[in-house]
Amino acid sequence: MSKNEKVTLEEALEYHKGSRPGKIEVVPTKPCFTQRDLSLAYTPGVAEPCRVIEKNPEAVYDYTSKGNLVAVLSNGTAVLGLGNIGAAAGKPVMEGKGVLFKRFADVDVFDIEINSENPDDVIKACELLEPTFGGINLEDIKAPDCFYIEEEVKKKLGIPVFHDDQHGTAIICIAALLNALELVDKKIDEVVTVINGAGAAGIAIGKLMLLVGAKKENIFMCDTKGVVYSGRKEGMNKYKEEFALVTDKRTLDEAVDGSDVFLGLSAKGALSKSMVKTMARKPIIMAMANPDPEITPEEVEEVRGDAVVATGRSDYPNQVNNVLGFPFIFRGALDVRASAINEEMKLAAVYALKKLTREDVPESVCKAYGVEKIEFGKDYIIPKPFDPRVLTWVAPAVAKAAMETGVAKLPIKDFEVYKDQLESRLSFAKEFTRQAISVARQSPKKLVFPEGEYEKIIRAANRIVLEGIAQPILLGDVERIKKLAAELNVDLHGIEIIDPRCSDKIDSYAAQLFELRGRKGTTLAEATRRMHKITDYFAAMMVKNGDADCLVNGYSRNYPDAVKPLLEIMPLEKGYTSPSGSYFMLFKDRMVLCADTTVNIDPTAEQLAQIALQSADTLRKFQIEPRVAMLSFSNFGSVRMERTIKVEKAIKLVNEIDPKLIIDGDMQADTAVYPPIAREAFPFSKIKGDANVLVFPNLEAGNSAYKLLWRLGSGIAIGPILQGFKHSVHVLQRGVDVTDIVNLAAIAVVDCIEKSK
């Protein structure tokens, strides 16, 4: 269980108030800084798209934000567990929903609060708002009004409408239930289920259970009046009638007795420990009342050790959280311009979540929850809300179902491309890494990992195979690697394992190392020892001899130890006297390459010139035109001293070698990355716009800058990229996670592809 502290009243109020009240704002997506911008954004320019849309209403999706805009609409009659608190009091929840839409699926939201408890008013409001929105998410509307409202709105509108309190909860619940049933070896068409809470979510769960194979006669629906049975008059409506059973059971206690599954959507304490004792073997208990569940996992554990338990809370395992559903369901629906969200699309989301739970969980997710490992089992029957893969699993599944059922107006042609686009929606970093992976897939290379006995390297190698990035080679004890892979449940198919000690090439490699380093104090015996004991040397020789195409090391080593074998063995590219190290720093909307950040302590002018040329080369490998800023504490000679003169000399050397390269300096860092400074004060600068390569004057500056950007600037660091070597060899940051390893592997393959041209 997580050790999260309870949120206090003061913290919650301060979070929502802060320096700017509320949680959302409207941010323009087009510039509006000049008179011309204003003319385009408003009059007269805005008239042109208006005329086009008048002639062709579908063009509204091309010229406005409608295609990515959802209304979160409520009348505040059933807000969370607070009840009928009114439209205004419900607004913080609707704003919060908007935050989640944007954070998890890049869907824009306007929250709409309707000041009426009349269902027909809500229906009319939805009709009137249809021109504005690409979809409507109904929220926190009391039952049975919510059923009537959704039914009528879906009939009248040609955009997707989804009541999340019903279907969102149902989708996540059923995905978790199907996984739990497999764990306890029971079948959906055989289990007896009690649904406690016959409101929006309870009814929706019952309906979805029927769609996945449950039998109606095995579902006991209960509310505050007890079991919903045939002939009951009190507290009934037509929606409950669908689940009225012919039974002599009348109370929740009686319904729970002998049941296999309890699904709670009611109130704290509704399920007692004595009731749990009466349930069948290996019961499944999903106590989803918020903020306090019907029964806590600790209480269940006191009386049953064989139960699988889920709640709606984040501080317990198996959180049934709607955020796993609605952002991605709407994302998929919007992207194919669906006219509705139908049952097939909901089921597609269910099965996507069910299947994703079986996949290897990224380390970043484990870290977010403060654990070392998460795997399918009693405490993990549904993906975690912060798992970034939910977007690329659920949205495509929903989109495909929309296409197959004929409600998609804009079908997706290539789902692999679509998945890449989904990842890039959330950050430039995702777009950049997906592009690198896409290029690597076109020509996968043999990639050797010297540290093959480490868990993360093995898991990364598996991901690399699944992504089609490379053909991984793991160095180490073969049996040890196989045993660890089995413990991790990692498939080694497509991964080659080599134990250097048993290789018939080890003597040849040792002789070559002796030839290279003999006049630098390395004896043949020492060369042989290194080949047997230090896998980095063996891996470097593999690449040098063409037995592998590229290399990634450094996971378990200090950087100097990891780079030393490469410096001793790998030849440099023609014209270079030393290598350099750079980092891709990726932000939400841009990327910069920082160099040198790892190798040259106090570079000469000649070395600075080489660093600039090597960095420009690196950027070109990714089809990006380099704009190189040579950084200093001076702006274009404003300070004349040895350090700044060195930078000037370096630029002259670069211009002689590559006169077409866009490079300028010396300049301060803000001049390089903030265009208005150069535009106003230094209009002669060759860099028009912002620089994308930053060459630092020494290692202190470069290393400090990239780490500050990484830790304080919310940048993602990929590297270090070793530049200047004839072969593609790269060093990881020590102790990075699996995703970082996979990203650098893709870059290593791209580098290898480009070097071979």
Image (spheres, rainbow, N blue to C red):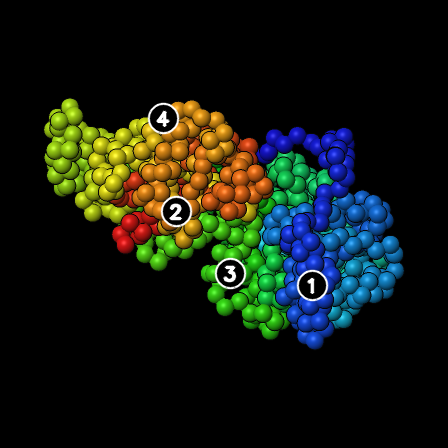
Given residues 21 and 13, the one toward you in this image is: 21
Q: Which residue is mark 3?
A: 418
**Mark 2 = which residue?**
661
Between circles 1 and 3, the one closer to the viewer is 1
Q: Is residue 629 visible?
A: yes
What residue did someone put label 1 on?
45
Q: Which residue is mark 4?
A: 602
- Tell me the kind of residue under disc 3: Tyr
Contact check, label 2 and label 1, Cβ < 8 Å = no
Q: Earlier in the sequence, mark 4 or mark 3?
A: 3
Image quarter (top left, top right, bottom left or bottom right) of the C terminus: bottom left
Q: Which sits earlier in the primary sequence, circle 2 or circle 3?
A: 3
Instruction: Say whether marks 4 and 3 touch (CB < 8 Å).
Output: no
Q: Which element carries disc 2, helix, strand or loop? A: loop
Residue that protrudes farthest toward the bottom in the picture? 55
Q: Earlier in the sequence, mark 4 or mark 1?
A: 1
Please state which amino acid type lies under the numbered disc 4: Asp
Q: With respect to residue 633, does 408 lie above or below?
A: below
Instruction: Work out how far the residue at label 1 is from the one at label 3, CA to CA, in angstroms.
Output: 32 Å
> Residues under labels 4 and 1: Cα distance?
54 Å
